[in-house]
Structure formats: structure tokens, C-alpha cells
Amino acid sequence: MLSDFIKPGCKIELQALNRMSQGQNEEVKKVYLSKVYDIISEDRMEVIMPMEQTKLILLPVDGEYDAIFYGRHPYQCFLRIIDRYKSNNVYILVVEMTSNLRKYQRREYYRYSCALEMCSRSLVEEEIKAVEQNESAFLTPGLPLKQSVIVDISGGGLRFMSEQRYEPESLIYCTYCLLVNGENREYEVIGKVLAAKEMENKKGTFEHRVQYVNLDVDDRENIIKYIFEEERKNRQRERE
């Protein structure tokens, strides 16, 4: 039960899933601090409306947030605000969980488990130099690609399986498609290989952890939006 993990009075951090402010080129990571007021049901709770100094922050109804709860153990989920009101002189947000509650992993971006087709290859020397100089439109067309499968993805990187082994610290080109806002979009990203290891139960298949390099801010936001939409779909299927 939700009340087994989250208690009234539990501290909570709320961060908007849309992390861009209009007219800005940098990511905005505004975090709102508050507390859980009461547990309503298995997927709904009341949260005290956050304040800055003495000013109430009127978070919008239908706003979507990445939430971290700090109780005996930290937990994380996605939330949507469905109502707000005043009760007993306390300003309340009613929030609904749109993903499962899971233990909080202390990393910058939430990782979503998946199985997505991807193609990849190592960068050639000229491309590596261009990445180091942060140049755009540098990819060499027509070079052969290797098939692989993404097994988890986040706004900061991905993990994938491939019969091709890439060396740690090397730079690779990755291309895959995500369904965002009902539209299938192709993403072309450059990644730095953080780790590579052969799977014990599947010889000849290698697991890679990759961090994005010079990722476009809009692409990062769309990847995060894809993760949120897929978590919400999973949550709805579980209810049904």
C-alpha cells in the first residue's frame, strides 16, 4: 500500500517535467520543496502547496512533475496535479501518481526500462575532432551501422545491448526513433561510452552504458517527455 512507503509529513521535492523556460537556452531545474499532507488512496495524495519565503507557489492544475519523497528511504515517481484548494487554513494540492513508486536512484535523470531498436557506429577521426570543437553538421553520411537494442533510456544517456563491442571512453553515433506526442521522431545522438561488458548469460553480446555528448536541449526535453508518456501508459494499463 502507498501508505506503507509514504507518510503524512514526508518531505517532497517537485520538479517540473518541462524544464525549459521560454526564451532560455539553458535547462532550468527549478525544485519546489513541500510536505505530504495526507494519503487519499493508492495513487492519490494531498501535498501542501509549496512556498518561497512567505509567498505561495500556485503550481498549475494538470502540471506534471518528477517527485522525490524523503522518508525512511527515498522514493521517486511522476505526479500530475488534479486539484488545489484550501482546507483548515492549509493550501493543498491533490496529486495523482502517473508512474509506479520506486526507490530513488541518486542520478541526475530518471531511467526508463524499454526495448527499442537502435543503430550505432564508432565515430571516425574527423567526426571526433568536430565533436571536441562542438561543431554541428559534421556527420559523414553512408557509413555502415550496427544493430542494437536500447534497454533503458534517460535524459542523460542510455544503456544498450549489441554484438558490436565499443571501447570505454570512445565516441559513438546512435540513431533511434521515439513516439512523442503521437509522432514517430528519429533521433541522432553522439554518446560517450562509459562502460562495456560481455553478458555472462549471452556470450558475444555486450552491454554498454553511454552518456550523451552535446545533446540538443529540445531533443533532451523530448526524450524526457517520451519517458513520462510511456510511464503514464504503463500506469493506465495496470489500472485496467
Image (spheres, grey):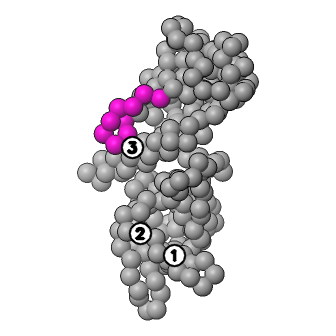
Q: How crowded is mark 1: few (under 14 residues within 10 Å), some or many (20 or more)?
A: few
Q: What residue type is labelled 1?
A: Ile
Q: In which quarter of the image is residue 202?
A: top right
Q: Which amino acid does label 3 sit on?
A: Glu
For the question of whether residue 69 can be seen, the reply is no
For the question of whether residue 120 can be seen, the reply is yes
Circle nearer the N terminus (1, 3): 1
Circle nearer the N terminus (2, 3): 2
Q: Residues within 10 Å of mark 2 (few under 14, many from 20)?
A: few
Residue topped by disc 2: 60
Give percent across and percent down for residue 129.
72, 19
Q: Check if residue 64 falls in the magenta segment.
A: no
User: Nearer the viewer's eye, disc 2 or disc 3?
Assistant: 2
> Which residue is the extreme one toward the bottom?
88
Q: Give the range drawn in magenta.
A: 179-187
Q: Which mark is residue 57?
A: 1
- The residue located at (59%, 71%) in the rendering is 33
Relative to 200, say whether 155 is above or below. Answer: below
Relative to 58, say whether 164 is above or below. Answer: above
Label 1's element? Answer: loop
Q: Are marks 2 and 3 in contact (CB under 8 Å)?
A: no
Is 200 in front, or is 26? Answer: 26
Q: Residue 102 carries which label?
A: none
Residue topped by disc 3: 230
